[in-house]
Image (cartoon, rainbow, N blue to C red):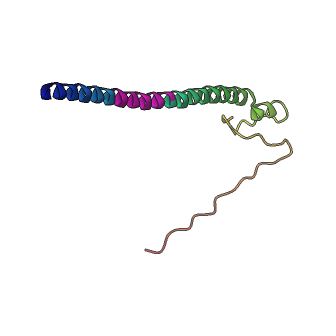
């Protein structure tokens, strides 16, 4: 009879241990699943943000490269000066503005030594 009770206790203990292991594996898989779903949500929103940002940046690049007021304003309103070569990215001045020329001050000999 003792053998039968010990065998029954062993079977019950084994069943409880197996049930606890299954429960623990379920908890771990639930946590992993929640992490994977959260990471997928974050990565999906990041992908959406990068796509929208890339499209807007491309649109801004296209518009800014197509609109160049400095090159258009220089057109025919002011004659080209041979002494000043055209520089890329030069700022256009109104036709009535006169350029300011600064002269260097005379250099005096250094007598401090």
Q: How many marks?
A: 0
Q: Nearer the viewer, residue 97 or 26?
A: 26
Q: Residue 108 at x, y = what percent?
A: 56, 67
* Quadrant of image for the C terminus: bottom left
Magenta part of the protein: which range?
22-37
Q: Residue 22 at x, y = what percent?
A: 34, 26
Q: Residue furthest bottom?
A: 112
* Quadrant of image for the N terminus: top left
Apparent side of residue 82 relative to residue 46 in the rendered image (left or right): right
Apparent side of residue 98 relative to residue 105 in the rendered image (left or right): right
Residue 21 lies in the magenta-colored region = no
Q: Residue 87 at x, y = what percent?
A: 66, 36
Query: Residue placed at 35% from the left, 31% from the top?
Result: 24
Q: Residue 81 at x, y = what percent?
A: 75, 37
Query: Residue placed at 52% from the left, 29% from the top?
Result: 43
Residue 35 lies in the magenta-colored region = yes
Quarter of the figure with residue 16: top left
Up the image or down, 10 lies above or below 97; here it is above
Query: Residue placed at 69% from the left, 30% from the top?
Result: 60
Q: Residue furthest front?
A: 1
Apparent side of residue 47 relative to residue 68 in the rendered image (left or right): left
Q: Nearer the viewer, residue 76 or 23?
A: 23
Q: Nearer the viewer, residue 104 or 12?
A: 12
For the stretch drawn in magenta, the main secondary structure is: helix
Q: Nearer the viewer, residue 76 or 11?
A: 11
């Amino acid at each position: 009879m003792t053998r039968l009770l010990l065998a029954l206790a062993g079977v019950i203990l084994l069943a409880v241990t197996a049930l606890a292991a299954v429960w623990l594996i379920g908890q771990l898989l639930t946590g992993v699943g929640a992490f994977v779903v959260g990471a997928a949500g974050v990565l999906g929103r990041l992908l959406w943000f990068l796509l929208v940002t890339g499209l807007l940046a491309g649109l801004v690049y296209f518009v800014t490269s197509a609109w160049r007021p400095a090159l258009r304003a220089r057109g025919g309103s002011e004659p080209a000066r041979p002494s000043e070569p055209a520089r890329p990215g030069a700022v256009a001045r109104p036709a009535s503005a006169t350029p300011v020329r600064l002269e260097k001050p005379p250099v005096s000999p250094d007598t401090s030594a």
